[in-house]
Image (spheres, helix red, strand yellow):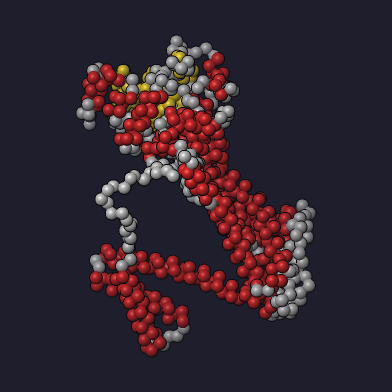
């Protein structure tokens, strides 16, 4: 869904930023098969600190529009931090700081005229632990993004159904849309969270280990969901599961941090190449499970 | 009918499968307990009534309890291991403590109920005022409806004033915080410790005298709201703080502003806890006596206008009836009746709060259950 599909402008600030000159040649907006504008993300020299302690060092990464980019790397190397920088969730943590630029379709999301809430609406996020709103029904959970970000759509129930279908959950819940969101299995809750993110038509979907708490069947379902979504939204996914990274992603970035150096990207490239013929020995060790 | 969620029965399986009953209390446990209780009673009687030069029911039962605990531990030690004995002993001590606390409450309620019976059985007690009833007249004349009306009106005013303010303050403390949160929290804590008569004096000086409102129900409502405010704020802050941070993050990640997150996610999630906070404060507020007496005066007549004229409330009626000069047993019985009415109001308040704040998050209401069933029955 493009911005104008809802019949109104709800992006004044980002559009304001957009009406300025794009900051470089990468205007990553392209058209998908469905005539839909897709936006990529571009991180430039991103560094991050927690209370003065540096955890990311000049990370630059291009996440192509309409493709799935996987972030892999050992625990604590800054993948989640990087992901949260991509939709301005990092700044919510007390004592967190960052440097660098993140461009959505060529425009810096850290531009002072851009509201953080606007960025987060356009760059959705699915968390490691499913977090549906317990006080809301399944239906209201999916529709919550509309209320929370102040979007009006002509037909909410259509949108809810569409989002649930895209998240692969419709079949399982369409008979009990009014029951509480917490009354689902973990895997269903996670797909509910995906549906909730999709309902506000984000340009980019960030997923932080979305399957780490799930069984193989639910994982499978979510991977299918990702595959179906990938030509509609740009997806960035953090995963510890090498097979999963291999299966779902087109591009892959390998992060690494040692105890005295902050996290950085060792290697970035097409997933196939990263897994079969990596340039760096450490990448090869990691994807083959030979890493300390 | 739908068969979602039920698998066809496997052939060869028994057609009934009853859930097993998991028993945590064995007959042995019960007998040990009863044995210790009876044994302690016997020894206690012997020692206390025959050997020692003490008398009195209280001492008797205290001794009995100590003996009972010792007997129980000794009996348990004969059969079970140290760890189990310690576990069981603590379980028994804690449960008897709980039973004792409950018994005290039940005793108080039952006592005032029994004492109030002579008054509350008369229908006129619930429908009349004291305007035409002298102190010596029988209980078949006069009632407390004027005080009940005053109580309810003043409590309503106090609730309307203190709850929005208190919850706003709690949202500020729990959600926004910052440098200003500290002094605010200190003041709220100090207000909790504020003797309520001070609130009464404050309102008396500011509202009744300076503002020229005169003694009235509104002034009392304001005084009660000062008493309720810190209770609401502190309880609500605690409730807001236990809303998981992951929900807050989820809301922000959907593009919500801080304000919308609070309004649409945090407050609804904390709803039942907030209802409890409000009831706690109301239960505290309705019992206020001294400040109300100070700023609303007292009256034997019905005055439903909270904005003008003196008003009686249930607690001030109790106070007046008992402390009136000379002894009037009928007035004391009326006071007990008013006390019963007061407890009734509190119970009703609790029921309302349970109903409104209701279900734990995620729990279905009856209506939702019915709707689900209807939806499931549709082909
Ligand atoms: N809130 C925080 N405060 C202080 N330090 C933090 C905070 N969150 C993360 N860190 C630190 O930042 C570094 C990167 O953390 P991050 O969560 O990004 O790692 P990760 O790659 O996502 O790890 P995992 O795979 O285990 O999720 C770690 O060293 C961690 O200790
Ligand atoms: Mg992480």
- Residue B114, percent from left and from top: 59, 75
Number of numbered callouts drawn: 0
- Residue A20, percent from left and from top: 54, 14
- Residue A58, percent from left and from top: 37, 21
- The quadrant of the image that shows the C terminus of chain A is top left
Identify whether B49 is placed above or below B106: below
Identify whether A134 is placed above or below A195: below
Residue at 52% over, 70% down: B106
The answer to which image quadrant residue B123 occupies is bottom right
Decide which of A82, A130 is in the foreground and name it: A130
The answer to which image quadrant residue A14 occupies is top right
The answer to which image quadrant residue B23 occupies is bottom left
Residue at 55% over, 55% down: B354
Decide which of A291, B8 is in the foreground and name it: B8
Residue at 39% over, 18% down: A64
Q: Is residue A257 visible?
A: no
- Residue A188, percent from left and from top: 40, 37
Residue at 67% over, 79% down: B329
Q: Is residue A55 left or right of residue A92?
A: left
């Amino acid at each position: 869904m493009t911005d104008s599909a809802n019949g109104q402008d709800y992006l004044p600030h980002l559009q304001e930023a957009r009406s300025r000159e794009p900051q470089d040649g990468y205007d990553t907006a392209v058209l998908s098969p469905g005539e839909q504008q897709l936006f990529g993300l571009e991180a430039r020299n991103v560094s991050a600190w927690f209370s003065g302690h540096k955890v990311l060092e000049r990370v630059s990464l291009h996440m192509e529009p309409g493709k799935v980019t996987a972030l892999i790397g050992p625990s604590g190397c800054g993948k989640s931090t990087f992901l949260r920088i991509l939709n301005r969730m990092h700044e919510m943590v007390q004592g967190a700081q960052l440097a660098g630029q993140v461009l959505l379709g060529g425009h810096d999301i850290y531009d002072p005229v851009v509201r953080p809430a606007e960025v987060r609406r356009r760059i959705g996020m699915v968390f490691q632990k499913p977090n549906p709103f317990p006080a809301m029904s399944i239906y209201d959970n999916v529709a919550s993004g509309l209320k929370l970000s102040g979007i009006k759509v002509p037909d909410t129930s259509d949108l809810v159904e569409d989002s649930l279908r895209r998240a692969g959950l419709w079949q399982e819940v369409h008979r009990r849309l009014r029951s509480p969101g917490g009354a689902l299995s973990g895997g269903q809750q996670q797909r509910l969270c995906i549906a909730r993110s999709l309902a506000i038509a984000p340009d980019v979907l960030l997923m932080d280990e979305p399957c780490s708490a799930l069984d193989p069947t639910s994982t499978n379902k979510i991977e299918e969901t990702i595959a179906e979504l990938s030509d509609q939204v740009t997806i960035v996914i953090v995963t510890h599961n090498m097979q999963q990274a291999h299966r779902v992603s087109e591009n892959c970035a390998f992060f690494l941090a040692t105890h005295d150096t902050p996290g950085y990207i060792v290697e970035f490239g097409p997933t196939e190449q990263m897994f079969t013929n990596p340039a760096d020995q450490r990448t090869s060790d990691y994807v083959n499970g030979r890493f300390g | 009918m739908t068969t979602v969620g039920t698998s066809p029965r496997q052939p060869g399986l028994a057609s009934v499968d009853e859930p097993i009953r998991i028993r945590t209390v064995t007959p042995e446990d019960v007998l040990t307990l009863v044995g210790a209780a009876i044994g302690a009673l016997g020894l206690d009687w012997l020692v206390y009534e025959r050997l020692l030069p003490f008398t009195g029911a209280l001492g008797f039962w205290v001794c009995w309890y100590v003996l009972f605990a010792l007997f129980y531990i000794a009996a348990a030690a004969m059969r079970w291991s140290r760890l189990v004995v310690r576990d069981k002993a603590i379980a028994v001590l804690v449960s008897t403590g709980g039973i004792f606390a409950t018994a005290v409450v039940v005793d108080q309620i039952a006592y005032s109920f029994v004492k109030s019976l002579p008054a509350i059985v008369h229908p006129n007690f619930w429908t009349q005022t004291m305007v035409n009833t002298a102190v010596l007249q029988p209980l078949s004349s006069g009632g407390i409806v004027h005080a009940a009306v005053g109580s309810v009106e003043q409590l309503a005013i106090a609730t309307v004033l203190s709850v929005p303010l208190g919850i706003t303050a709690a949202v500020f403390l729990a959600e926004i915080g910052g440098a200003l949160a500290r002094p605010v929290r200190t003041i709220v804590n100090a207000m909790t410790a504020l003797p309520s008569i001070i609130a009464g004096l404050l309102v008396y000086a500011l509202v009744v005298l300076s503002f020229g409102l005169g003694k009235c129900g509104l002034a009392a409502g304001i005084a009660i709201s000062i008493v309720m405010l810190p209770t609401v704020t502190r309880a609500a802050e605690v409730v807001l703080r236990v809303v998981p941070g992951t929900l807050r993050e989820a809301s922000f990640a959907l593009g919500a502003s801080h304000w919308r997150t609070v309004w649409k996610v945090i407050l609804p999630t904390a709803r039942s806890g907030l209802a409890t906070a409000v009831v706690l404060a109301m239960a505290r507020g309705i019992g206020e006596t001294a400040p109300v007496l100070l700023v609303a005066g007292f009256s034997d007549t019905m005055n439903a206008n909270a904005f003008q004229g003196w008003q009686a409330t249930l607690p001030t009626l109790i106070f007046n009836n008992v402390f009136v000069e000379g002894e009037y047993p009928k007035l004391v019985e009326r006071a007990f009746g008013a006390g019963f009415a007061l407890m009734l109001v509190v119970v009703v308040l609790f029921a309302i709060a349970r109903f409104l704040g209701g279900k734990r998050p995620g729990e279905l209401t009856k209506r939702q259950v019915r709707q689900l069933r209807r939806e499931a029955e549709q082909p």
